[in-house]
Amino acid sequence: MTDTAAIGPGIAGQDMPDAHDLLGSVADFLRALVPELTGERRYHAQVSVYLLDIVRREWAGVAAPPGAGALAALMGGQTQENLNTAALADAIRSGALDDTSDQVLAGLLDIARARASVVRPEYITAGDAQSV
Amino acid sequence: MAVIDPAWHDAMLAAVRRRLGPDVGIEIVNVPTLGGSNRTVIFDAVGGGEIRRLVSRQTTFVEPGSPFISAQHQFSIMALAASRGIAVPLPVFCFDPQDALGEGFVCEFAAGETLPRRILQSADFAAARGVLAAQLAASLAQLHAIPAALAPELAQYPTSDDALAGLRAALDFYGEPHPAIEFGLRWLERHRPATPAPHVVLHGDFRLGNVMVGPGGLRALLDWECAHLGDPAEDLGWACTRAWRFGAVQNHFAGLATRSQLIADYRTAGGVAVDEDTVRYWEIFGLARWAVLNVMQAFGHVHQGRRGVVYAACGRNACLIEHDLLMTIAGQYD
């Protein structure tokens, strides 16, 4: 993944610890701090840990979901890598993809699952929609 | 507790004295700032040997793209609901330009619990849980008995005209393409309920978290900033939306009761007959709407200076709601 290469360990020639370690250190610190806080500050500290964990998983990289390729094929002339989200949204809105809505649904679900696996991996199995 | 700005304190003191009398003082009790669009301050008005506990609700979301009705209209709808015997915190006064407090109002304080998981799980609310579902259904029936003509101020909001078009316009405003939400909107467009529904006053955000509950059950309906006009089933569907079951997914209605129980209780209390598929339709609408509201918070965080870790998290959580939206359309979730 390009983003990972730009930010990831070693590229900028820094000494240890690498960026993942720095991030994990801050997350661990905040996690330990949470029980000492109350009210809104406690809540915000919990959410901050949640956000840092998202970044950690995002940097670790996630395989492109097969659904992205299927949607690109439906859109014609696009590939999994250059799937144009805005064009896809427009095509769905216009009704142009109504005839293939089952395939669109399957592809979108694939993408949502892949994103959720970064944002909150336990969510898919727990099957429960909550705000943090 | 957040710190109160002395200038705000003085402005509020002057505003209270104009309405309640020149000898009244105010004592700040708490600043519970967990809400997303309002600054809430709880205070006591003290004077003449009496203490009256009040709440100031000041609008903090003042940028374009707000999905919320004006504070003045929240105030007037709460007054209308109160006049019909619906349990709401009684409105006391609305801010005016002389107050220099921006947009907002003061209402009476309703004591109790709002946190959904505490209401659903704590032993303190065991008795409340036995009656709450029916009480909530009855409140909705009472509210929906108010014809749209009595709340003409709500007609100007896009969601009062066509909820689906209003939602689509909101998503467009935030400017980030969301194919999954589009898929939901397209599905909703193609599956609009065939039977025309009555046009009534809706709460618009009727769910646990926005109701005050005591050990004996419902005390007051709070948070009227999404009130609008529409199909009564929209409020029922929002209350059954998966996001508001708080883990108790088999109890569609607020984690408290099944969808069919809500429909039966609502009917018993004088509400119109609603079928389960119509409620399901509005649950799918609810998931699309909840996803858009999360995009809205991320938009505020990235583009409008309403910064915060919670708003940032909302943006990333949109994919979780999209997942539920798609799973529900696919028939994998009920």
Image (cartoon, rainbow, N blue to C red):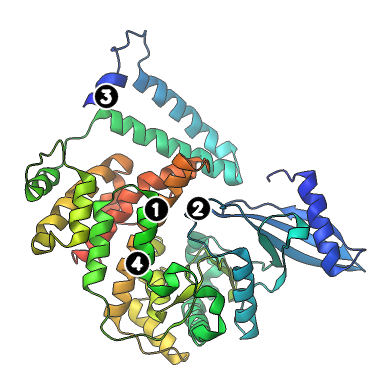
Of residues A10 and B58, the one nearer the viewer is B58
Residue B276 falls left or right of residue B290: left
Residue A4 shows which numbered tag?
A: 3
Q: Looking at numbered disc 1 in the image, what kind of residue is underneath it?
A: Phe
Q: Looking at numbered disc 2 in the image, what kind of residue is underneath it?
A: Pro
**Badge 1: few (under 14), some or many (20 or more) residues near its Cα, within 10 Å?**
few
| Tag 3 and tag 2 share a subunit | no
Residue at image coords 27%, 63%: B185
Q: Mark 4 touching mark 3, by CB under 8 A?
A: no
User: Circle 2 is placed at which residue position?
Assistant: B64
Cα distance between the residues tagged 1 and 3: 31 Å
Residue at image coords 56%, 84%: B150
Residue B138 shows which numbered tag?
A: none
Cα distance between the residues tagged 4 and 2: 18 Å
Residue B165 shows which numbered tag?
A: 4
Q: Mark 2 touching mark 1, by CB under 8 A?
A: yes
Chain-order first, disc 2 or disc 1 = 2
Chain-order first, disc 4 or disc 2 = 2
Of residues A8 and B173, the one nearer the viewer is B173
Under circle 1, the secondary element is: helix
Viewer can see residue B211: yes
Residue B10, position as x, y percentages in the image: 82, 51
Residue B173 shows which numbered tag?
A: 1
**Badge 3: few (under 14), some or many (20 or more) residues near its Cα, within 10 Å?**
few
Image quadrant assignment for residue B26:
bottom right
Which chain is mark 4 on? B
Q: Nearer the viewer, mark 3 or mark 2?
A: 2
Cα distance between the residues tagged 4 and 1: 12 Å
